Image: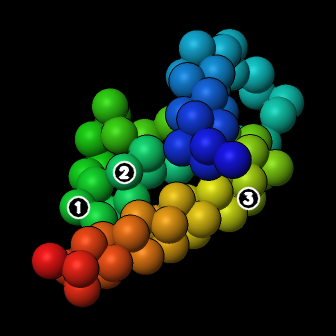
Protein backbone atom coordinates (compact mmCIF):
# COMPACT_ATOMS: atom_id res chain seq x y z
CA UNK A 1 0.00 0.00 0.00
CA UNK A 2 1.32 3.45 -0.87
CA UNK A 3 1.01 5.26 2.47
CA UNK A 4 2.76 8.38 1.14
CA UNK A 5 0.18 8.75 -1.61
CA UNK A 6 -2.68 8.47 0.88
CA UNK A 7 -0.93 10.95 3.20
CA UNK A 8 -0.43 13.58 0.49
CA UNK A 9 -3.97 13.11 -0.85
CA UNK A 10 -5.33 14.01 2.59
CA UNK A 11 -2.90 16.94 2.91
CA UNK A 12 -3.67 18.33 -0.56
CA UNK A 13 -7.43 17.99 -0.08
CA UNK A 14 -7.14 19.85 3.23
CA UNK A 15 -5.07 22.63 1.65
CA UNK A 16 -7.74 23.24 -0.98
CA UNK A 17 -10.91 23.13 1.10
CA UNK A 18 -12.98 25.87 2.64
CA UNK A 19 -12.61 26.25 6.40
CA UNK A 20 -15.88 26.41 8.30
CA UNK A 21 -16.15 28.02 11.72
CA UNK A 22 -18.46 25.33 13.09
CA UNK A 23 -15.99 22.48 12.38
CA UNK A 24 -13.09 21.69 14.71
CA UNK A 25 -9.65 21.68 13.04
CA UNK A 26 -6.14 21.05 14.27
CA UNK A 27 -2.93 22.43 12.81
CA UNK A 28 -0.67 19.75 11.36
CA UNK A 29 2.99 20.05 10.36
CA UNK A 30 3.29 18.51 6.88
CA UNK A 31 6.96 17.81 7.47
CA UNK A 32 7.06 16.95 11.18
CA UNK A 33 9.06 19.23 13.46
CA UNK A 34 11.00 16.17 14.62
CA UNK A 35 12.27 15.80 11.05
CA UNK A 36 13.19 19.46 10.61
CA UNK A 37 9.78 20.88 9.70
CA UNK A 38 9.18 24.53 10.51
CA UNK A 39 6.19 26.46 11.83
CA UNK A 40 5.92 28.26 8.50
CA UNK A 41 2.57 28.70 6.78
CA UNK A 42 3.58 26.45 3.88
CA UNK A 43 4.34 23.60 6.31
CA UNK A 44 1.04 23.83 8.21
CA UNK A 45 -2.39 22.61 7.21
CA UNK A 46 -5.71 22.51 9.07
CA UNK A 47 -7.04 18.97 9.47
CA UNK A 48 -10.16 17.59 11.07
CA UNK A 49 -9.56 15.52 14.19
CA UNK A 50 -10.17 12.33 12.22
CA UNK A 51 -7.78 13.36 9.42
CA UNK A 52 -5.13 14.35 11.96
CA UNK A 53 -5.33 10.95 13.62
CA UNK A 54 -5.11 9.17 10.26
CA UNK A 55 -2.14 11.16 8.93
CA UNK A 56 -0.14 10.50 12.10
CA UNK A 57 -0.83 6.77 11.76
CA UNK A 58 0.31 7.05 8.12
CA UNK A 59 3.48 8.93 9.09
CA UNK A 60 4.44 6.10 11.44
CA UNK A 61 4.00 3.58 8.63
CA UNK A 62 5.88 5.76 6.12
CA UNK A 63 8.88 6.39 8.36
CA UNK A 64 9.06 2.81 9.68
CA UNK A 65 9.13 1.64 6.05
CA UNK A 66 11.84 4.17 5.15
CA UNK A 67 13.96 3.37 8.21
CA UNK A 68 13.81 -0.38 7.51
CA UNK A 69 14.88 0.14 3.90
CA UNK A 70 17.60 2.61 4.82
CA UNK A 71 18.96 0.19 7.46
CA UNK A 72 18.89 -2.65 4.95
CA UNK A 73 20.80 -0.57 2.41
CA UNK A 74 23.44 0.36 4.98
CA UNK A 75 23.90 -3.29 6.03
CA UNK A 76 24.08 -4.48 2.42
CA UNK A 77 26.69 -1.89 1.34
Q: CA distance from mark 1 to mark 2?
A: 7 Å
Q: Which residue carries the number 2 mark?
A: 31
Mark with earlier residue (3, 1)? 1
Q: Position of residue 35 (x, y in %)?
A: 29, 65
Residue 23 vertical position relative to residue 3 in the rendered view, above or below: above
Residue 14 vertical position relative to residue 72 in the rendered view, above or below: above
Image quadrant where residue 47 sits: top right
Image quadrant where residue 21 sits: top right
Q: CA distance from mark 3 to mark 2?
A: 15 Å
- Asked whether, in this view, residue 23 is left or right of residue 16, the answer is right
Q: Secondary structure at mark 2?
A: loop
CB under 8 Å between callouts 1 and 2?
A: yes
Q: Which mark is residue 9?
A: none
Q: Which residue carries the number 3 mark?
A: 53
Q: Nearer the viewer, residue 62 or 28?
A: 62
Mark with earlier residue (3, 2)? 2
Q: Which mark is residue 36?
A: 1
Residue 5 vertical position relative to residue 76 in the rendered view, above or below: above
Q: Nearer the viewer, residue 55 or 1?
A: 1
Mark with earlier residue (1, 2)? 2
Q: Secondary structure at mark 3?
A: helix
Q: Residue placed farthest to the front in the image? A: 76
Residue at image x 43%, y 76%? 68
Q: Nearer the viewer, residue 34 or 44?
A: 34
Q: Position of residue 75 (x, y in %)?
A: 24, 85
Q: Would you say residue 7 is visible in this rendering?
A: no
Residue at image x 65%, y 38%? 6
Q: Would you say residue 28 is visible in this rendering?
A: yes
Q: Residue placed farthest to the bottom in the image? A: 75
For mark 2, does the 10 Å Cα neighbourhood hold few (<14), some (14 to 19), or many (20 or more) residues? Answer: some
Amino acid sequence: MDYSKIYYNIINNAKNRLIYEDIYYENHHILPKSLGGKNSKDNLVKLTLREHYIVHKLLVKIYLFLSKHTSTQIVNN
